[in-house]
Amino acid sequence: MRYSSQVKPISYLKANAAEVLKQLGEQQGPLVITQNGEAKAVLQDVRAYEQTQETLALLRILALGNQEIEAGKLSPLDAVASRLRARRKVDA
């Protein structure tokens, strides 16, 4: 996606807010808002925002997992599987 085609001045947002919101919902891409020629804000559809937040959460989990691997905080697979089976029997 090219952000250069999704750049609008704040005056455009003020004059066309309803249309901007409609376009955000249809295009699923962010809109960069400028003020005095400088990028100042990014508008994004709420669904796209939620998806971005979920992706970031998964990336954080992966990063934490990689840190634990690097720190040597590992458990053998059979030990983990045994603990999970035992826990399932208790919950059943």
Image: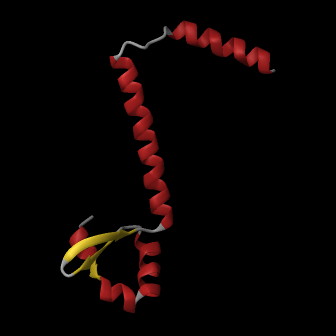
Q: Residue furthest left?
A: 37
Q: What residue lies at 45% left-to-right and 61% top-to-bottom?
A: 48
Q: Is residue 15 above or below residue 4?
A: below
**Left or right position of 55 against 10:** right
Residue 36 spot, x, y in % from top left: 20, 82
Residues 86 and 70: in front is: 70
Left or right, 81 with respect to 41, comes to right
Residue at coordinates 71% horizontally, 16% vertically from top-left?
87
Against 29, is 12 above or below?
below
The residue positioned farthest toward the right in the image shown = 92
Q: Quadrant of residue 90?
A: top right
User: Which of 85/75 is in front?
Assistant: 75
What residue is at 18 percent from the left and 79 percent from the top?
Answer: 37
Residue 57 drawn above or below residue 36: above
Residue 88 falls in image quadrant: top right
Q: Position of residue 22 (x, y in %)?
A: 47, 80
Q: Quadrant of the C terminus?
A: top right
Q: Position of residue 82 (x, y in %)?
A: 63, 9
Q: Is residue 3 above or below residue 56?
A: below
Quarter the N terminus occupies: bottom left
25 left or right, relative to 32: right
In percent of the image, x 32 and y 70: which residue is there? 41
